Image (cartoon, helix red, strand yellow):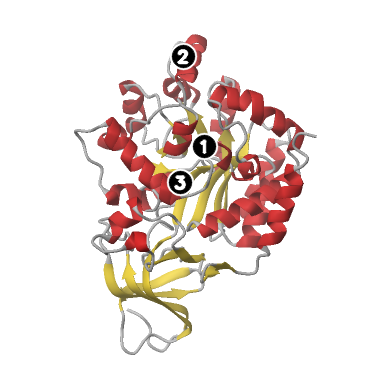
Amino acid sequence: MLNKEKEFSKVILCEYLLSMEGEDGKVKQNQMIVIEKNKIQFVGPVSNPLPKAKEVIRLNNHLVCPGLINTHTHLPMVLFRGLGDHLTLKGWLEEIIFPLEKKMINPDFIRVGTELALLELIKNGITTVCDMYFHTPVMAEVFESYGLRGLLAVDMLSSFSDWKEDLDSLCNQYGKENQRVYPAIACHAPYTCEPDLLKLSAEESEKRKIPIAIHVAETEWEVSEIKKRYGKTPVAHLKDCGVIGPHCVFVHCVHLSEDDINIMAETNTPLSYNPESNMKLSSGVAPILKALEKGIVVGMGTDGAASNNDLNLFTEMDTGAKLQKLKNPDKTIEAKDIFSMVTSSAAKVLGLSHRIGKIQTGFFADIIALDLNHPNLYPRNNLLNHLVYSASGREVDFLMCHGKVLMKDSEIQGVDEFRIYAEAELMRKTFFQ
């Protein structure tokens, strides 16, 4: 029960609310969300009189939802957007990305790329990401400044900074409760990380009680290469190295055998599904329906904007759902299950299901709203289906993360967007000099 005498931080009045509290995808009308500082105190029908609040936010003609969760990104790579778009993964990495990273990666590049990416995240309704890249403490500073939530993974292979120093810095500064930044470990892939490094990563993960994110079975070449080296699939190899389980995020998983799926199910290892990147780089279509049938938790990711080419989970949902139907014409995947992959299930993938992914009492106030006055959202036959198959992301005009409003009426608060655009263009001019 709400304390009627207490003055709360905010009350949000919702004409339509999709809370995902019951994970059933039901949209309720005329609801209110009561927020104190960074947490939700109450969700339910609008009362008369309203609870006392310092601010009342009226979202008429809007659909209010949990903030979206992107389970796999390389945010600073937005600065490489549009390069090598004709190449598949191996050529794209070896001919374009690795040489440019060797030349360009420094703290300033990371800062500019992260700022540009965070603008895109906010405008597309994304409040949380799981990111793998370099100079992670610099990224953490940008996240803190902007107010978004990030599980930021330090790359164990990085030649650009010392992984232990970066990881110590993150764990010391952001290891406490109620922070928006969560430290993690990144291992690029089984074909780039030697077994000793994978085992060290597993040890560090256990010691520090933090997750590991790793690309797994992304291409047929990778599966063939790992079998050649170790006589087993990437998933079986990672299990032998101790990189397996609910604290790991296996990204892509396009080429999984039945045994691989069983191993992941038995070890409760979650999966990050990145359909558009897998299409663009000709990697294939991940067996998501088989994974779901085995009880594997699946979240959705965009990958980096260099291989997608955006950070938009709305288009990702649409593409990802249709691909599964194309691959499995005799089976169905419901809109509520797809939307869960960017909200409640995505939170489970990141080990944060007790804090985010739903608009529920006790959860962090990560909330977005879509303006329904767009022709692609009429008639309102089924708003959940519209979210998955019709929305583009342009409809998001309100975003709150950790109880703080970061975008209102489509305006990002307290950020000079044109400064960031100008800095990104200056950075671009140095790429091929």
Image-quadrant location for residue 90: top right
* Three-letter code, disc 2: Ser
**Marks 2/3: CA distance?**
29 Å
Sequence-wise first label, 2 or 3: 2
Mark 3: few, some, or many residues within 10 Å (few <14, many ≥20)?
A: many
The amino acid beneath tag 1 is Ala
Q: In the image, 149: left or right of 429? A: left
Q: Which mark is residue 213?
A: 1
The Cα–Cα distance between marks 2 and 1, rounded to whole angstroms, is: 21 Å
Residue 224, numbered label: 2
- Residue closest to the eye, 128 or 269: 128
Who's the residue at 31% across and 56% down the image? 386
Q: Residues within 10 Å of mark 1 (few under 14, many from 20)?
A: many
* Location of residue 157 in the rendering, given as x and y in whole percent from the top left corner: 65, 30
- The image shows residue 87, relative to residue 345, as above or below, that is above
Task: Tell which circle, 1 or 3, labels the residue nearer the N-terminal end.
Answer: 1
Instruction: List the single residue furthest toward the right.
Output: 433
Q: Quadrant of the N terminus?
A: bottom left
Q: Which mark is residue 27?
A: none
234 relative position to 404: left or right? left
State the mark number for residue 350: 3
Across and down, in percent, residue 410 comes to 52, 67
What amino acid type is highlighted by mark number 3? Leu
Give the mark nearest the N terminus, 2 or 1: 1
- The residue lying toward the viewer, choosing from 10 and 238, is 10
**Of labels 2 and 3, the one closer to you:** 2
Q: Is residue 364 shown to the viewer in this render? A: no
Q: Seen in the image, is 212 located left or right of residue 419?
A: left
Q: Are marks 1 and 3 in contact (CB under 8 Å)?
A: no
Give percent across and percent down for residue 210: 53, 43
